[in-house]
Amino acid sequence: MIYPFMGIETSLENIGWFYCFGCVSNVVFCGQGYFLGIWIDDEINVKTVNSLFAMCWMAANGVLSNLTTANWFI
């Protein structure tokens, strides 16, 4: 549903890469959640730290900002 509205050229290769990155992201974030669940005892703190990691990664990988005009810190 989101793919046509992102302005990506619709081709079989691009759709394949889109779904590939989606699946890999799912595995990575599930692994991160399991790791934090083992590392931190309190469930509420795990959710907070996981959200913090997700926000930092979204801000740094170009989802929320353009990498060519991003701040030096990002």
Image: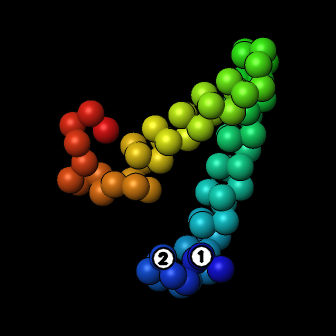
Q: Is residue 37 left or right of residue 65?
A: right
11 relative to 19 in the view: left or right: left
Q: For the residue marked with disc 1, what is the amino acid?
A: Ile
Q: Which residue is mark 2?
A: 6
Percent of width and height locating residue 39: 72, 15
Q: Which mark is residue 37?
A: none
Would residue 57 appear left or right of 22 to someone viewing this image? left
Quadrant where the C terminus is found in the figure? top left
**Up-down relation of residue 67 to residue 9 (above or below):** above
> Relative to the observer, which residue lies in front, 1 or 12?
1
Image quadrant holding the N terminus, namely bottom right
- Any part of residue 35 in sight: no
Figure quadrant of residue 27:
top right
Dot 1: within a 10 Å radius of its alpha carbon, few (fewer than 14), some, or many (20 or more) residues? few
User: 44 or 63, which lies in front?
Assistant: 44
Q: Position of residue 12 (x, y in %)?
A: 62, 80
Q: Nearer the viewer, residue 64 or 20?
A: 64
Name the residue type under label 2.
Answer: Met
> Residue 19: percent from the left, percent from the top?
67, 65
Question: Which coloring applies here?
Answer: rainbow
Using the rendered image of the protein, determine whether residue 24 is visible from the camera's viewpoint. Answer: yes
Classify mark 2: residues with Cα within 10 Å, few (<14), some (14-19) or many (20+): few
Look at the numbered disc 1 and give the secondary structure of its residue.
loop
Residue tagged by mark 1? 2
Label 2 close to label 1 by CB (< 8 Å):
yes
User: Height in image: 32 above or below 58?
Assistant: above
Relative placement, left or right, of 22 versus 10 is right
| Direction front: furthest residue | 44
Vertical comparison of 4 with 22: above or below: below
